[in-house]
Image (cartoon, rainbow, N blue to C red):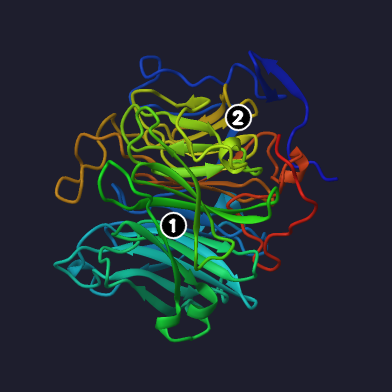
Amino acid sequence: MTLRAPFMFLLIGATALPAGLTAQHVPPTREQASHPKIGGSSNIDVLSHIPLGGFFKVADIEIEQELERPYVYVSQMLVHGFSIIDVKDPEKAKVLYRFRIENAELHQGTGGMDGKYFKVNGRYYYVQSFQFGQGGPDSDLGAIVFDVTGLPDATKVREVARIREPSAPGGFHNIFAYKHSSGRALLVTTVGANRGNLYDLDAIVGGRPSSQWKIGEVPVPESNLGPGGYHDFYVGYDPADRKDKLYGAGVGGYHVFDITTPDTPQLMFSITGAAGVNYGHTFTPTPDHAFAVTETEYQYAPLRIFDLRAGQSGQARNINRPVGAWTADWRALSHNHEVRWPYVFVSAYEDGLQVFNMIDPSNPVTVGWYYTFHGAHNTGWGGTQNPRGQSVMNGAFGVDVRNADGLIVISDSESGFWAFRMEGFQGWNGEDWGMPNVSSVQDWDRGPVPGPRVTTN
């Protein structure tokens, strides 16, 4: 088999680290670092950087996974749109296309937040979520779908459909595109209500009536914390029991649903009552669905790691104690993340790109970093009425990884787009690690490939 990740290890404490990633890769403390923090570890190479407008003009990021389609999509807040970046030569990245919603100056709210690409019937699409408030146009607009098959010719990018949700105005904060085991292409979205929505992307791009687009809802389990919705979703196929599973982060904590039949999601178990967690932000399982990396959004909060095995096996309906935790700097906050076992790639706001190894989930170890944010501590987002408030929510916002070759991309809310490589990481396939080949990356042509039944110890 082709080795896409290093297999020689050095033991540091109780954690196995790939050779070359030694104990010298320990980020400086804020007292040790310059103000602001600059530079990075010796195993992270900066390939390119493109500014995209300055303070909080940048949100999440998505990279296409096929090497012959070298396109990165960057959602853009406040300017209400997105940009497409060509990384055919990652050292010479360039902006190919910019979209801004019509009459942008009239729109209220943050605008472009999250984007995902997908493929249906041989054509490529990009769906961009939006959040607009009442008092301006499009408060019921959740997302716009574009046909991007014709790239790199930007003149061939065309709008296909607009997804609206008038029953819960305020748009979609986060979305997740998923190739279901049934063969359907699905979109899961947050909404301004105590549920998430499930859409049939085949119906949307196939020109069916909008009444046929929405196929289901994912309810928020009852919580003593009051009403509220979801912040983020992850969906993945679990070969252990051959189920499509949705991981929702929101009020109460984190919730796992069986969506093998997507129009009737079934709650499997939750993570609630964990110390310091009233609201889940992000919830990402490992490829075998045995553990999960989670975020809750407040200063000083670490990323918590939970053991999911009792819930997956039906032995527990609720889990409330993490088995591990990680943070780049306890004074700040780490944001979104991508799991490529045993690595976790983190967009860590003020601490930029961070990479840790969780081969021992109880003892995660930092193995690389680069500071993309060069501003002062605690000068981040304070809301639309007070954008530059006293907050640590500034800096590296989104992260994505191209599995084919290991290219890492970061969207920084202030400094823009970045591309990196990490020494010894030339790509990722779960099977190289004795894991299912499951991540946020979708096989849009085949969908989940069940293979032999897998058991989780």
Crowding near the residue tagged with mark 2, few <14, some 14–19, many ≥20 C-alpha atoms within 10 Å? many
Can you say whether 282 is above or below 143 in the image? above
**Residue type pointed to by label 2:** Met
Q: Is residue 279 visible?
A: yes
At x 68% / y 38%, what residue is drawn? 425
Of residue 193 and residue 5, the one placed in the foreground of this image is 193
Residue 69 % position (x, y):
62, 64
The quadrant of the rendering that contains the N terminus is: top right
Residue 245 % position (x, y):
56, 53
Crowding near the residue tagged with mark 1, few <14, some 14–19, many ≥20 C-alpha atoms within 10 Å? many
At x 23% / y 68%, what residue is drawn? 139
Can you say whether 130 is above or below 401 in the image? below
Q: Is residue 47 visible?
A: no
Disc nearest the viewer among 1 and 2: 2
**Residue type pointed to by label 1:** Val
Residue holding disc 1: 74
Ranked by sequence position, the earlier of labels 1 and 2 is 1
At x 57% / y 23%, what residue is drawn? 362
Horizontal side of residue 206 vs 163, given as left or right: right
Asked which quadrant contains residue 235, the reply is bottom right
Residue holding disc 2: 358
Numbered circles on residues, count: 2
Secondary element type, mark 2: loop
Of residue 211 and residue 71, the one placed in the foreground of this image is 211
Can you say whether 453 is above or below 316 in the image? below
Asked which quadrant contains residue 33, the reply is top left
Secondary element type, mark 1: strand
Which label is found at residue 414? Answer: none
Q: Residue furthest front?
A: 315
Residue 35 % position (x, y):
33, 23
